[in-house]
Amino acid sequence: MTDAETTRETTVGELSEGQILRGILDRLPPSTALVGPGDDAAVLAVPDGRVVATTDTLVHGPDFRLAWSSAHDLGFKAAAVNLSDVAAMGARPVALLVALAMPDATPVSFVRGFADGLAAACAELAPGCAVEGGDLTVSDTLTIAVTALGSLDGREPVRRSGARVGDGVYVIGELGQAARGLDVLFRRFTDAEGAPVALTAEARADLSPADAHALSRQLTPHPPIADALRAAAAGATAMMDISDGLALDATRLADASEVTIAFASAALGDDAALALGGGEDHGFLVTFPADAVPLGRRVGTVEARGADAITVDGRAWTGRAGWDPYRDWDAGRG
């Protein structure tokens, strides 16, 4: 037997679905469901009988590149982007359902690292939430689909349609860092033709602290889930996850509430254009009435609906609005 044969990694194509699944479940924390993984479906206990549900899909190419993201990164990010959507409704995340479609040649070590990332995200961002089921299948393109479920715990959902004239507009979390991280990847980790090159540990160690932080926020977003739940309890009138860019998501909130969101550029940081147009921050855009004790930093005011859904310093925003996969995929930055 050659050295290459003895060091070759086992691939998912060499195992059964049951063997792959067992390798995932062994790395996840114990189920918190009444009936967890192992049956045809999970059975969850939801205190007030209402379930908040969301789903998100990550596809190799437009959403991530394996040259840049480790298996652990992908597991963490796949969980985080769904946990943030549940929390944006004011709901406590309670379960994830994960579907993974992989090429036959995918190393089994990738699946294990991915499971570790899922577990780490749940433990860090939403303690008590667990992976309670999912699906495995074969695909030419690595595709990750996650469904997150949450409990309102007796509260009403915080919808994007509840903003009222006179409310303050707040942001919980960072703005523009994930976009900065994406710029670092395209600027420093592509070849002459623009194809991704491997992001090694040594290369990451050479980054400045600012670039390293931005890169971490792109590859492993850390939505402030607990703060979103506190915002809901504090009387937020509207809230949504900032995933596609502050300007685009604020436009959606303004349209749903039939108001205008008036931003102050000085409140958006050193680079207002990046704060407004950069996507994947996974913080929270929240509106609070004047009599509430708000969370986050104030960035604007809700005004009566005018000609524009959002304004910046009293003028219509004409810069980049954020990420739209159907509009921006050709640009290659996803």
Image (spheres, rainbow, N blue to C red):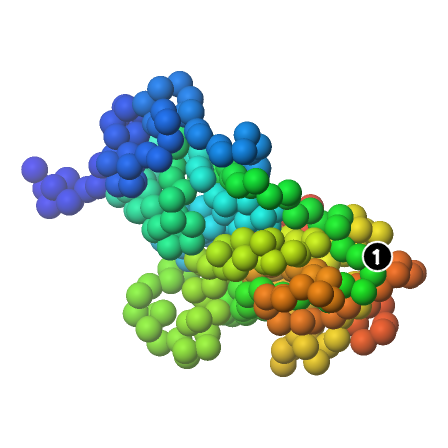
Say few, some or many: other residues with alpha carbon within 10 Å of mark 1 (under 14 / 14 to 19 / 20 or more): many
Is residue 231 shown above or below 96? below
Residue name at image x 64 percent, y 53 percent: 240
Q: Residue furthest top?
A: 40
Q: Position of residue 181 (x, y in %)?
A: 50, 67
Tell me which corner region of the image, top left, top right, bottom left or bottom right, holds residue 202.
bottom left
- Residue pushed farthest front? 291
- Residue 123, position as x, y percentages in the image: 35, 50
Residue at 38% x, 60% y: name it: 198
Hey, which quadrant is residue 50 in on the image? top right
Residue 244, by quadrant, is: bottom right
Q: What residue is rendered at 73% in x and 77% in y?
A: 265
- Foreground: 237 or 56? 237
| Residue 34 percent location from the top left of the image | 37, 27
Q: Where 159 falls versus 26 (above or below)?
A: below
Q: Quadrant of the N terminus?
A: top left
